[in-house]
Image (tube, rainbow, N blue to C red):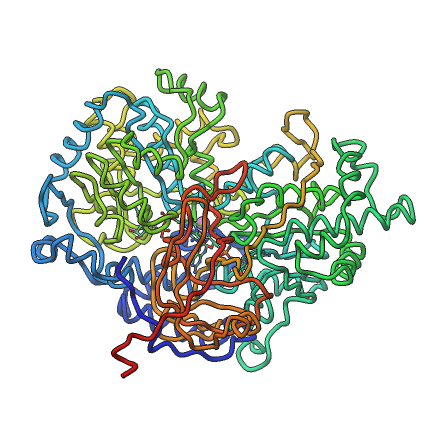
Amino acid sequence: MGDDVTGSGIEVSRPATSAVGPRAVEVSLRRALNEMGVARSLATLTAMNQVDGFDCPSCAWPDPSPGHRSHAEFCENGAKAVSWEATRDRVGPAFFATHSVDDLRDLDDHSLEQFGRLTEPLYLAPGATHYAPISWDDALQLCAQHLASLSDANRAVFYTSGRASNEAAFLFQLLARRLGTNNLPDCSNMCHESSGVALTETIGVGKGTVSLEDITDHADLIVIVGQNPGTNHPRMLSALETAKRRGARIVSANPLPEAGLVRFKNPQRARGVMGRGTALTDRFLPVRVNGDLGMFAGINKALLAREERAPGTIVDHPFIDAYCDGFAEACEGWRELEWSQIEEASGLSRTQIEEFADDVVAAKSVIVCWAMGITQHRNAVATIREIVNFLLLRGNIGRPGAGPSPIRGHSNVQGDRTMGIWEKMPDAFLDRLGEEFGFAPPRDPGYDTVEAIRAMRDGRVDVFVALGGNFVAATPDTAVTMAAMANCRLTVHVATKLNRSHLYHGESALLLPCLGRTERDVREGGEQFVTVEDSMSMVHASRGRLAPGSPHLRSEVAIVAGLGEALFGEDVGWRAMAGDYRVIRRHIEQVIPGFEDFDERVRQPGGFMLPRGPHDSRTFATATGRARFTRNALDAIHLPEGHLILQTVRSHDQFNTTVYGLDDRYRGIEGGRRVVFVNADDLAERGLADGDSVDLVSVWSDGERRAEAFRAVAYPTPRGCAATYFPEANVLVPLDSTAIGSNTPTSKSIIVRLEPVSVPSAAMT
Ligand SMILES: Nc1nc2c(c(=O)[nH]1)N[C@H]1C(S)=C(S)[C@@H](COP(=O)(O)OP(=O)(O)OC[C@H]3O[C@@H](n4cnc5c(=O)[nH]c(N)nc54)[C@H](O)[C@@H]3O)O[C@H]1N2
Ligand SMILES: Nc1nc2c(c(=O)[nH]1)N[C@H]1C(S)=C(S)[C@@H](COP(=O)(O)OP(=O)(O)OC[C@H]3O[C@@H](n4cnc5c(=O)[nH]c(N)nc54)[C@H](O)[C@@H]3O)O[C@H]1N2
Ligand SMILES: [Mo]
């Protein structure tokens, strides 16, 4: 993979102790003006997250209710995401005629996307060195021919990234299932899959149960673990500020003291601009990487001990008796746990955990928010089950200001799942889908992301179709995935911009350029809008305003429906659905519970909330119809002598594999991304110092993997832990290192050692 920078030229300063403030506004405006110019900047930024505008394509944080939105309802990173999409730069056929695929492979990820928006369908013929233009009809026919001639529908894989609208996602899963496969891996397999698995098992629904108002208006205590909201969900800081102003407490646990957890300078308030801003975290717990299972087991043990000392004062027995299973067994587990095990696993002292317990006992209602710092570990599912135990103990679910809140990533990743993008949708969904469209959907579970890579690697896949995303860069074991793609006969990407996945192709490849969120979508039935679901189950409309980036772009809905029609003719009404998205919404209404009167309700300002059984009525659709306590074994990672646990994070200047720039302002990094954050004592112990150049070598049962030349940065992270950026570090993540129960790659716990880069002999003379 083209390296963006070597260790040289990177400037390191002290990490920031507050987030946002006037600098964030300045950066947003500068990026917007550079990429879009004045008119487009105004047209986009004023429409973002507004009732009649478009949904920000960045994260899935919910919008305030319609009367409570500001005129600038966006954050710095939302502004970057929009500038990235609505840029005036274009990359058309002339560019591809002069740049071969091989040449493009030498460029780094930042440069590839910087060329601008794709303008026309492109085809890379077998043996060809360059992408060349192809008509839409030919492109769709070619793809359809490949799919129709498969010996088995399971030799096709349909990948979805979480930016696809509900309508596009619904059609995409229909296409795959109509063809006869459930091979529908998605980015969620690498993201919140562990949350989905753990929550479905314990509370009967695979998503969070709280709403924005629960955070802003009701919670007494908000626990934020394994999440960096200042960078990845910046609008969450405004909600936390509101909660703080009415007296809520915040406890954060993170191996990195992220600036956005410490203090927020709200640029829309005077004291955010001139003053010190609002302190957010009241108690910071520097948990060790992968230590959260130990921490939550510890707090549960502490709460149980207090209950046993003063029965009836801590545990919500009426709730547990009426609604839960498995309490006695879970208690046995906590009683048997030794504090020494808890301290070792979590990296926290018993005192720190007891103090956290004081906060919990003082709070009538508690919310736990989490993201990738929890889900991307081998024991992630067990950790989230333990978080559920923690909430159930005091009845912190099914009442205002309480509950689990997995903070979702991509802007519509949650909606895509609701629409059926999942390799193992339940039979009830498949039954209704088959009934609505008059066919028999396949029942065998399909491949998830890791399984899809294995199948491609082993020659069991001929056609790979991606609705968005950057499969090669986002997945683990980069070298393995790149080779796996080359085993396919055809790889197809529906995309807005050029990225690395388009350059690691099958025998032939198609690049199909689509409209983005910001653009007007006019079909035979007139101007269309699409719908999305946010992290808190609100479904709402999104309407682009800009003229399409090129006259040849098609909407994702039109592309998927076009492929359906090329494959199956008019069997399920592909053309009607592509002409008028209301037709798709009518089908969704029939297939997916909670979408009654979909089209009417989603037209209301702000949209509508999907039913959330555990929150609304303490209904738990689990195997036993009750919420379930679980007993979770503490299995701390065993680090071989001299090794560190490496986690891979996002910088403040990227959206997943899209690198906007080379700075990470809040962590004090400027001008490069090849840095590794390590505790100063761990560096010293290895005879290293801040500024040294090191290779990262990961160890796994099948051998070692290496990422070269990172600048060591002495950083306040617990001993034994390290951090670096993804996607550069994905070469280090072994394909088979995944979470138990969810198969999510363990991108946050890679066992590595640091190897000093030896000074080339020429330099020594
Ligand atoms: N601007 C921007 N916004 C984004 C994204 C983006 O790339 N850029 N990506 C989107 C997507 S798809 C997602 S999923 C979300 C991701 O949102 P986050 O999960 O916030 O993203 P990460 O950068 O992976 O940060 C993980 C955080 O968990 C901490 N952490 C790591 N390991 C552990 C651990 O073992 N325990 C604890 N307690 N903490 C740990 C890290 O120090 C870091 O603060 O953001 C979404 N929003
Ligand atoms: N090591 C490590 N690996 C990780 C993670 C980690 O924390 N550490 N995080 C994981 C997570 S949480 C996730 S969600 C995945 C992300 O995996 P993906 O979703 O596959 O990757 P993205 O980088 O979000 O995809 C970016 C690409 O999407 C395309 N795109 C952008 N907008 C649109 C659009 O409107 N339509 C279409 N069709 N395409 C569009 C662009 O071409 C862009 O290049 O990565 C995972 N990988
Ligand atoms: Mo994600």
Q: Quadrant of residue 568?
A: top left
Judge by depth and name the residue closer to the eye, 509 or 716.
Answer: 716
Tell me: 576 left or right of 47.
left
Q: Quadrant of residue 467?
A: top left
Judge by depth and name the residue closer to the eye, 196 or 571.
Answer: 196
Tell me: 129 left or right of 6.
left
Tell me: 356 left or right of 154.
right
Residue beneath the point at 11% across and 35% down: 138
Do we see residue 53 in this rendering?
no
The percent coordinates of residue 696 (x first, y second) are 41, 61
Q: Quadrant of the C terminus?
A: bottom left
Residue beneath the point at 33% across and 78% down: 9
Do we see residue 97 in this rendering?
yes
Judge by depth and name the residue closer to the eye, 89 or 720.
Answer: 720
Tell me: 359 left or right of 197.
right
The percent coordinates of residue 682 (x first, y second) are 55, 69
Q: Quadrant of residue 362?
A: bottom right
The relative height of residue 290 versus residue 630 in the rendered view (above or below) is: below
The percent coordinates of residue 254 (x first, y second) are 59, 61
Residue beneath the point at 48% across and 21% down: 427
Q: Give the number of callouts.
A: 0
The relative height of residue 646 versus residue 159 in the rendered view (above or below) is: below
The percent coordinates of residue 328 (x first, y second) are 80, 34
The relative height of residue 327 versus residue 679 in the rendered view (above or below) is: above
Name, please, the residue furthest toward the right: 310
Q: Quadrant of the N terminus?
A: bottom left
